[in-house]
Image (spheres, grey):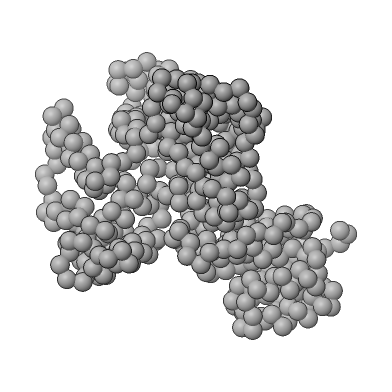
Amino acid sequence: MTGPATILVADDDAAIRTVVRQALTRAGHIVRTTETAAGLWKLIDDGQGDCVITDVILPDANGLEAIPRILARRPGLPVIVMSAQNTLSTAVRATEQGAFDYLPKPFDIDELARAVASALAASGTTDEPPPVPEDMPLIGRSPAMQEVYRIIARVVPTALTVMILGESGTGKELVAQAIHDLGPRRSAPFVAINMGAIPRELIESELFGHERGAFTGAAGRTAGRFEQAQGGTLFLDEIGDMPLEAQTRLLRVLQSGEYTTVGGSRVQRADVRVIAATHKDLRGAIDAGEFREDLFYRLNVIPLRLPPLRARRDDIPALARHFLDRAAAEGLPRKVLDAGAVDAVQRHDWPGNVRELENLMRRLAALTRGDTIDAAAIADGLGEPGRVAAAPSVTADGLAASVELHLARYLEVFGEDLPPDGMYERVLAEIERPLLRLSLAATRGNQIRAARLLGINRNTLRKKLTQRGVDPTARTD
């Protein structure tokens, strides 16, 4: 392309048109704006435009529905969609219709400029994406979730391996299921396996299957999860708990696309999309010799980090109402949250994340008298009485009592379902992080003194700082 590019902007908000025009003009582009779809059609029919930016809601048309019409008139013309309807469904529908990119409002103007630059540099069109179900399993319009939606929308049409990272209870399997359900493999099986829930000696058999007589008790041939997921998606949850010997076999499958059953000799082809997930720090596990670095890079092609619930507090009321609606649909009494309850759920830190919130809403739906849940009911459900208890003394017994109380409440939120395996490591991590940060703060960042205070050597301190993600230069006021 020679000379400046012409960007067509369609939005009924005059302020947005002005801001976008000024920013893109400063970037060296020619900008033509309109507030209607009809105005956009005229510009396109006149042969103008090297890139289109359109809002979803226009006075005379739906921007998403207009994309196929734009591409029919001008094949290859990149279209960037803006929308205040910040849902996963909107993000994926934009991809479905052929949009080059999707930007949730409000957006960063520099991000828009980068999207325009990428659109102008790109060529060709993408394959037709799958239809988007109306009832999406993911809820939230916070900026953190918007980034999750955008990544999902981009990886759905591909066969790339995805690594979902996040704390326990953030919804990693829901995301994996959504990627499968929206992708080209949606008519084939979605098979999930939790690495932490299977005895180490049985993992290879579970993954790859076994032949009769392969080991004591193998009375017949059994298909493994790779075979069960053939043509579809295999979700490897808690991949950080996989033993090293099984990691080696998994790496070979990912490299070659082939495997053999335990006790078998016939090579089988694995036509499977792999999605992995973990709450662990895999880089720390690599440093500790507990996870293969080459396997990590094979799995971490597209990293997708799910935010903890405390990082998306604006989404909490909508999630709570969704879980109450679901409980009512399943036969529990219909309940609503009053203003005090909404404030209470937003202020809580939710160590168990979305799973903890869902379990609390179910419990309150079943046990709360009347049809309204108030702040007192939330506090009781969370084990937070109205009066403030005296702080425990800073002694071994006092600290142990405080930790025991916290863990008791944590386990309580899961009800009859226990949390995922690996609680020991998670608890150690939660205790070590503040201990490391406060020790560094007490010694003004002097790692030699901090190591002496903790009773460990400096190399161990450095390793733990890396393993626990603690910045040794950060201040703790």
Locate residue 193, reporting x and y percent: 45, 38
Quadrant hosting residue 38:
bottom right
Specify whether residue 165 is in view. Answer: no
Q: Is residue 287 above or below residue 402?
A: above
Q: Is residue 469 above or below residue 164?
A: above
Q: Residue furthest right?
A: 2
Q: Residue furthest top?
A: 457
Residue located at (77% from left, 54% from top): 122
Residue located at (71% from left, 76% from top): 33
Specify whether residue 373 is in view. Answer: yes
- The quarter of the rendered structure image containing the N terminus is bottom right
Name the residue nearer the viewer: 210 or 441: 210
Quadrant hosting residue 119:
bottom right
Name the residue nearer the viewer: 22 or 393: 393
From the viewer's perspective, is 1 left or right of 88? right
Residue located at (45% from left, 20% from top): 215
Locate residue 27, reporting x and y percent: 73, 60
Name the residue nearer the viewer: 136 or 472: 136
